[in-house]
Amino acid sequence: MADRTATNREGLQGYVTHQAFKGLRIPATSQNLIMRDYVRGKGKVFRLSRGEYFFDGCFVQLYAMLRDLDQIEGIVMCSLFMLPDSAQKRREIFDQLLAAGGAMHFIYETLVVEDEAGVQSAEDLLLMNDALEKAPRVIDRALLPPIEGVDSFT
């Protein structure tokens, strides 16, 4: 078996999805341009992206990329929200990533996961997002304390 932390690895490989994430459906060509520019800006080699199959909840290509981390430095994708919704599945992905000594770059969230601190930051962002989606959009004015000198909030 190859040394999973070998130094002969080169480049970040892109991962694109045809599925919507966070209400966005971004064409693969646009995702590739975004990732290419990001990777170039990091002074690294951009390796041809793998596109996920067009089935809901499908992550076949992502798992295949994790198995190839002996050949690449890491994986780059547009958003953290492209990962599975399941915390357990994400944990499995992050465990494989860290065991291989790789990195996962999430462009929109300006986040790189390459250690446990990165995993925790990613999970914190996902938890905050869940909390925001459940938070009320409007506060009943009767619940607000009166403000001296202000008659109304209109």
Image: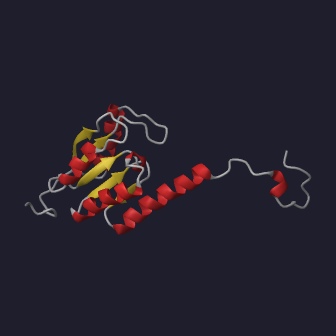
Q: Is residue 14 above or below residue 89?
A: above
Residue 5 quadrant: bottom left
The structure residue drawn at horizontal position 37% and vertical position 49%, both measured from the top left corner, is 83
The structure residue drawn at horizontal position 49% and vertical position 38%, both measured from the top left corner, is 23
Percent of width and height locating residue 34: 35, 40
Q: Is residue 55 above or below residue 70?
A: above
Percent of width and height locating residue 95: 29, 62
Between residues 87 and 31, which one lies in front from this camera angle? 87
Percent of width and height locating residue 151: 92, 52
Looking at the image, residue 142 sits to the left or right of residue 59; the answer is right
- The count of marks equals 0
**Colour mode of the rendering:** secondary structure
The structure residue drawn at horizontal position 37% and vertical position 37%, both measured from the top left corner, is 56
Looking at the image, residue 77 sits to the left or right of residue 23; the answer is left
Residue 119 quadrant: bottom left
Between residues 20 and 74, which one lies in front from this camera angle? 20
The structure residue drawn at horizontal position 42% and vertical position 65%, both measured from the top left corner, is 120
Percent of width and height locating residue 51: 27, 37
Which quadrant: the N terminus?
A: bottom left
Between residues 57 and 121, which one lies in front from this camera angle? 57
Outermost residue toward the left in this view: 1
Q: Is residue 30 above or below residue 140?
A: above
Which quadrant: the C terminus?
A: top right
Looking at the image, residue 102 sits to the left or right of residue 117; the answer is left
